[in-house]
Amino acid sequence: MKLSDLKPGETGIIKEFTDLALSVKLMEMGCLPGELVRLERIAPLGDPIAIKVSGYQLSLRKEEASNIILIS
Amino acid sequence: MKIALVGNPNTGKSSLFNHLTGLNQKVGNFPGVTMDKKMGTCRLPDGRVVSVIDLPGCYSLYPKTQDEAVVFQVLSDRRNESHPDLIVFIADVTNLKRNLLLYSQVADLGIPIILALNMNDLAEKERIVVNADKLSERLGVQVVKISARQRENISGLKEAIVQAPAFAVHKSSYTIPERSRNLVDAISQDFEHHSEYASLLMAHQYPSARHLSKEKTAELDRLIADEKFESQDQQIEETLWRYSYIDEIIRDCVEVAPKVEEPSITDRIDDVLTHKVWGFAIFFVVLLFIFQAIFSWAEYPMALIEGFFGWLDEVGRAYLPAGALTDLLLNGILAGLGGVLIFIPQIAILFAFIAVLEDTGYMARITFLMDKMMRKVGLSGKSVVPMIGGLACAVPSIMAARNIESWKDRIITIMVTPLISCAARLPVYILLISLVVPDDKVFGFFDLRGITLLGLYILGTVGAVVVAWVMKKLIKGRERSYFIMELPVYRSPRWKNIFLIMYDKVKTFIFEVGKIIVAISIVLWVSASYGPSGRMDRIEQKYSSEAFTSQYSGDQLERMRASEELENSYVGILGKAIEPAIRPLGFDWKIGIALITSVAAREVFVGTMATIYSVESVDDDDSNIREVMAASVNPATGEKVYTTATAFSLMVFYAFAMQCISTIAVVKRETNGWKWPAIQFGYMTAMAYLASLVVYQLLR
């Protein structure tokens, strides 16, 4: 399952990334394998999304979120 | 001694900078990038005065944008003029893990460092307890708890700075992987870096490092190829290693009370501000408010500034001896200066609003709301505010585009903002509309003139969107564009910070943009007041002959002479020279002259028309100039000059053309060169020409 598949309020645990270059940036922002994430909200136009990760709110585009694979 | 402040964005870094330096700060530019370089001085308890530089907030030393790369450049290159002797690293306690990632990278560079833990009110609420002594022991550096917002323990931090040189440098945490050993050794030898880690970073980033010579880059290319260095894999490996190192430290030094999960205040505010109805409604109201403010609040101070320069001009005329020098001083320099200072109120007001939006955290939500819509046309969510500001004036708006992180998004925003119809186009539109559009109502209540005006505004906006879309396809991004962005918690704005931002922006504008504006206005004034001596002599002779002057009153004579002088000035000659080119647009040489003089500022069009048609002062009422223009006929054909076709063609021309030296000057400063202002001037003029051509040929 991908992070972009979550519905608001749902949580998941990060397993791995599919895009190497993006993964460094995501990890720097606190999205690490093993970290708990919760989908906080989706922007009114359907994109981007906001997630809660390591204690703060992070927003990213759905396309970027689809590179984050969750433990299913 | 030089101190650099380093840290993530939104950690209280700028608050700390303001507390340390007070009003002793100035803003410059980092060479090569348009990133504000904030510097200041600070007096230490032992009486020494040290310089403090506030480096841009970033998340890691592996920069994702050119602007972020500045941090790596300053910290890794010993010869950089901003290279610090001591780093004060500010970390937000509520997000320590992510903050310490950057800390551990920066510390490995081998520059003496102090860790300032910003204990904000949230940390207290979430009951996060940090054992600073233990943390200090683990990291081997001084750790000071401060509260940047409440200004607590700034003196403690200053004490630590005094003590700093006595402390040993933090010992490197990260061991260079064996497979990169040879490469790092080779680079270290070459660059005399403080640390091996700086050499490793150089191996990762040398293609984008601006301070390297071509030879050095080629040498690194060769080294890297020899050692089969795989940048991406190693970055991932290193980041994961650092996080596990940080996890261990946090486990030992930080206690977090078990949290009760309940929606925070920020969550509840976000429920409203990013709501699909309320979110957009509130955003719209905020935009309307900002627009209203730069449009009408700025009017009073602008009138004051205008009045002041008018008064100076009168005084000058009354007391200075008449002559060329006085003319240059009053009509050239003073008028140019007035043209610069007139922008102060709008710049101050727009930046006050932007600072409040940034400071409260609402700007990030605007980006969140608008991203999808704006991305379609090649802009970013953050382009909305500059573009709305463009309705009042493009100058402060282009300065505001600095808040857009992505280089490509920022360039496109800067390129299209002047297409949005600004306040200076209004006098031109109003004059031309009242000339050719009847004062009728459509369907009983829609004012025809109002609809025409609205149409011109829509035309400009649509033009901006289309150009942005085209540029999105044409311009190549220099870096991969990410959206990944922190949504900071909501906070009340820090008024002192907002005041400082306003002050900085106004100062930068006056000193860096102002000189270009003054220079160009003087050139324009000289070419509009002087002409080839033969022509000017003839005018002189004509107006000194008694037989001629006795037929007219003094006022009339003066107006006629001004008109003839303008016609025979260099600008006048140029206006006539371009007539064949603008004929297909329905313009004659008189309009040609007005087009050239109004490059200074669009509203100059009305004044130039008045001079050319030698009508009386048009200060408050355009009716005189309107009557004269309406009555003017083409001497060759006997047809009216200002037909509907010509007037609409002219309006469309003004909607698209880059008739504003202040905008050119500000784009030059914001993009660091003449390339982009030249492209902008070129494409806007071409677009205006083609659109006018089509309009005139269709309506004729």
Image (spheres, rainbow, N blue to C red):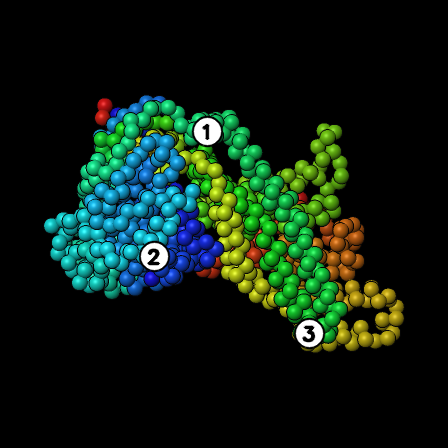
SS class of the residue under badge 2? strand
In-front residue for pair B8/B12:
B12
The answer to whether residue A42 is above or below residue B329 is: above
Asked whether the residues under marks 3 and 2 belong to the same chain, the reply is yes
Find residue A22 and report its image quarter. top left
Q: Left or right: where does residue B548 sit relative to residue B17? A: right
> Image quadrant for the N terminus of chain B?
bottom left
- Residue at mark 3: chain: B
Residue that mark 3 sits on: B324
For badge 1, the amino acid type reads: Ile
Cα gap from disc 1 to disc 3, whole angstroms:
63 Å
Cα gap from disc 1 to disc 2, whole angstroms:
38 Å
> Are the residues at dot 1 and dot 3 in contact (C-beta closer than 8 Å)?
no
Q: Left or right: where does residue B489 sit relative to residue B130? A: right
Residue that mark 1 sits on: B269
For badge 3, the amino acid type reads: Ala
Residue at image location 36% in from the left, 44% down from the top: B146
- Residue at mark 2: chain: B
Q: Is residue B203 visible?
A: no
Label 1: how many Cα within 10 Å (few below 14, some 14–19, many 20+): few
